[in-house]
Image (cartoon, rainbow, N blue to C red):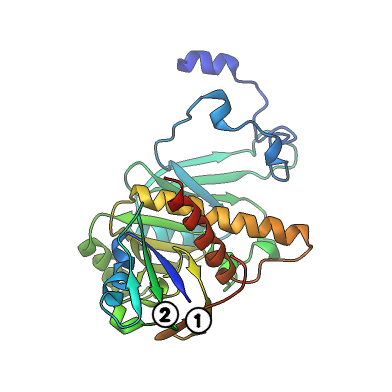
Amino acid sequence: MPRLYVVDVPEFRPLVETSRGRDGYRVSDTRKGYWLIETDGPMTFERKTLGMKPALWYGMFTGGLDGEVADWGRDTVTVIGTNRPL
Amino acid sequence: MTADLIHKKARQETAFSTNRAYRTDGIDVAALKPAADDGVRLRLHGVDHTARPTWKLRETVTFYRDILGLPLIHTISARGWGQPGHPDFLHFFFDAGNGATIAFFYYIGTERPEKYLSEDHYFYAATHTAWGVENRQELERWKETLEARGIAVSPYTQHEGIESIYFLDPNGYPLEVTLRLRDVERIDGQDAELTLRAAIDLEDAARASGTRMTDIDAVWRRKAALVDAWLEDA
């Protein structure tokens, strides 16, 4: 299932904050500057909930994403698990 | 080294008057000696100037000096560089603050070659000048003032760590005014290394198989594996 590393800098912190306590989402403690978000099923985010402008939104997986982007629109994104090589 | 010694060591042939054998594009960078090998840490003190050619002298001076209000602080006018066939030229500098200038070359008697025409394309816009401002009020002052002076300015665009506005000069050169939103932290540099290592790995693999990298998703997957390894490496 999808695993997302989030760089521990202010602009990406909404990813961590909106994932905490969400059903099916696990957020690890930050280690060496990275948070890890894991989900049991598809991982979804909404841009307006994150409060991200488009330029940031389209770069928010830069920390590393073990998964497959199934659908990426201007306001929502869905990531599913993948067997593709890392 | 004192200025006198530097001058004694200088040769009459300059970088502009020789056959330009100093050029290093197309070389095998893997054959060069890394900085870590000789232990010499070369230091820089910010940007002195950037320079581009212009074929619109009046418009360029009017735009930078009179519309943007950047002081014209220096002009060189010369009979070429002493190199046969080199056109006479003007080279002029506008103050961009904090010791930096933006400079232009005007090559007298030449026409702008087609390949130097500006293009409305992101490849072209990648070469741009970004000036910094100190605070949000100043960024807003730039946008509102330039618009009031008749310049089309982009909306505010927030990136990682910076927020910018964009506009074009009369040559079609892209300009950016940017506000740094936070200091760059240690993790930014560490993360940059891992992102580029992931991408270089994939570029190497693609070259080896005669293909190209196709998307950023593959870089992100490779990056996840590199972060996994980096975290395990306590």
Tag shown at residue A40: 2
Q: Disc 1 or 2, which lies upstream in sequence?
A: 2
The residue identified by callout 1 is A80
Q: Nearer the viewer, mark 1 or mark 2?
A: 2
Q: Marks 1/2: CA distance?
A: 10 Å
Residue at x 26%, y 72% (from the top left corner): A17
Does residue B136 appear to the left or right of A75 in the view shown? left
- Mark 1 and mark 2, same subunit? yes
- Quarter of the image where the C terminus of chain A is located: bottom right
Does residue B25 appear to the left or right of B123 in the view shown? right
Q: Between B33 and B20, which is closer to the camera in this rendering?
A: B33
Tag shown at residue B86: none
Q: Quadrant of residue B18?
A: top right
Q: Quadrant of residue A38?
A: bottom left
**Residue A76: % across, % down:** 41, 86
Residue type indicated by callout 2: Asp
Residue type indicated by callout 1: Ile
**To which chain does the residue with label 1 belong?**
A
Dot 2, crowdedness within 10 Å: few (<14), some or many (≥20)? some
**To which chain does the residue with label 2 belong?**
A
Residue at x 20%, y 64% (from the top left corner): B137
Does residue B40 appear to the left or right of B140 in the view shown? right
Judged from this view, the residue extending furthest toward the right is B210
Residue at x 51%, y 57% (from the top left corner): B195
